[in-house]
Amino acid sequence: MSTKRKSYSADFKAKLVLEVLEGEKTVNEIASVYEVLPVSLKNWKQQFLENMSLAFDCSQRYIRTPSAEIIRTL
């Protein structure tokens, strides 16, 4: 019998990472409260720290999609 892996939304992950970065609780405490694995929380924190500069990357702010192109031409 297989068990389904849990998936978490980006908003949920961000919320937990921000709690870790606040430093009021340990990773283990936060993981316990939200019932996630501490290693998952550590990975999310690492991903956030490695990619946080993308929030300020102006070249990636607006990506044109086919539907956006159609709307723009109207």
Image (cartoon, helix red, strand yellow):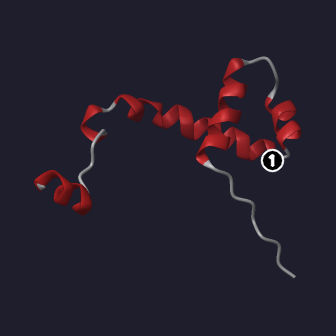
Q: Residue furthest bottom?
A: 1
Residue under the image location 18 percent in, 57 percent down: 69
Q: Quadrant of residue 29?
A: top right
Looking at the image, residue 9 sits to the left or right of residue 65; the answer is right
Pick the quarter of the image with the C terminus.
bottom left
Residue marked by disc 1: 37
Q: Residue 70: horizontal and vertical position, in percent?
A: 17, 60
Kindly identify the residue that appears in the image at 79 percent across and 17 percent down.
24
From what the image shows, is residue 68 above or below residue 26? below
Image coordinates for residue 55, horizontal then vertical, percent: 41, 32
| In the image: residue 73, left or right of residue 52 | left
Q: Secondary structure at mark 1?
A: loop
The residue that appears at 75% across and 45% down in the rendered structure is: 39
Up-down relation of residue 23 to residue 5 (above or below): above
Residue 63 at x, y percent in the picture: 27, 49
The single residue placed furthest to the front in the displayed view is 74
Residue type highlighted by circle 1:
Leu
Q: Quadrant of the N terminus?
A: bottom right
15 is higher (above) or lower (below) than 8: above
Instruction: Pick whichever, 8 or 47, lies toward us.
Output: 8
Which quadrant of the figure has residue 2?
Answer: bottom right
Tell me the quarter of the picture where residue 22 sits: top right
In the image, 39 versus 24, the foreground residue is: 24
Q: Residue at x 24, y 55 (%)?
A: 68
On the image, the x and y values in percent for residue 36 come to 81, 47
10 Å crowding of disc 1: few (<14), some (14-19), many (20+): few
